[in-house]
Amino acid sequence: MLYSEKVMDHFRNPRNVGSIENADGVGEVGNAKCGDIMKIYLKIDDNVVTDVKFETFGCGSAIASSSMATEMIKGKPLNEVMELTNKAVVQALDGLPAHKLHCSVLAEEAVKSALKDYYDKNGIAYDPKQFPDLSCESCH
Ligand code: FES
């Protein structure tokens, strides 16, 4: 079977779908090659992600990855959210086929760009190196 049961589960029954009004941080990223787009909304209180929602216009692996990523960062302090990697998402999904790994990268980037948005909006200093290449200029 190409996809793990966890991938199928998160694809068929994605968690945290939707948007958050007045979100504290919003991140939108796109994959230039496949054209898929992912948007993540964060609600942040006291340096903790208290709520998270996502909208993904993309393939099943992108949907499963964003669903899993939101589950992984919900209730977590921002320093742990910052450490989320696409590898961790893939592991939590019990793997993705090699040609679908880039879909999980989209999830990591969307989360980080939402975090960056929160920092920017609140004038919180950060090391720009923590957010490499998140500009989504090419897809606007
Ligand atoms: Fe585009 Fe999966 S094929 S994100």
Image (spheres, rainbow, N blue to C red):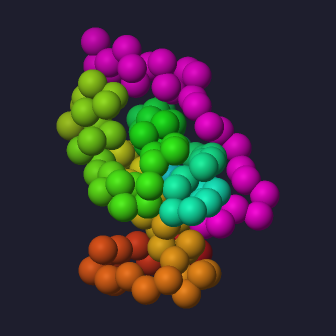
Residue farthest right in this picture = 21
Horizontal arrangement in the rendering, residue 101 relative to residue 49 (left or right): left
Quadrant of residue 1 within the rendered picture: top left
Q: Give the range drawn in magenta.
A: 1-29
Q: Which residue is drawn at 73% across and 53% down?
A: 20
Q: In this view, does 91 lie above or below 7?
A: below
Q: Which residue is drawn at 29% across and 36% down?
A: 90
Residue 48 visible to the viewer:
yes
Residue farthest left in this picture = 98
Q: In this view, does 125 lie above or below 107?
A: below
Closest to the observer: 26 or 49?
A: 49
Closest to the observer: 78 or 15?
A: 78
Q: Position of residue 41 (x, y in %)?
A: 62, 56
Q: Residue at x 34, y 83 (%)?
A: 128
Q: Where is residue 65 in the image (x, y as percent from the top left)?
A: 42, 39
The image quadrant where one finds the C terminus is bottom right
Please check the rendered image and state whether residue 97 is part of the magenta-colored stretch, yes or no. Answer: no
Residue 28 visible to the viewer:
no
Q: Which residue is drawn at 71% across and 50% down?
A: 19
Please check the rendered image and state whether residue 10 is part of the magenta-colored stretch, yes or no. Answer: yes
Q: Where is residue 38 in the image (x, y as percent from the top left)?
A: 54, 53
Q: In this view, does 121 lie above or below 91?
A: below
Closest to the observer: 19 or 51?
A: 51
Q: Where is residue 138 in the image (x, y as percent from the top left)?
A: 48, 76
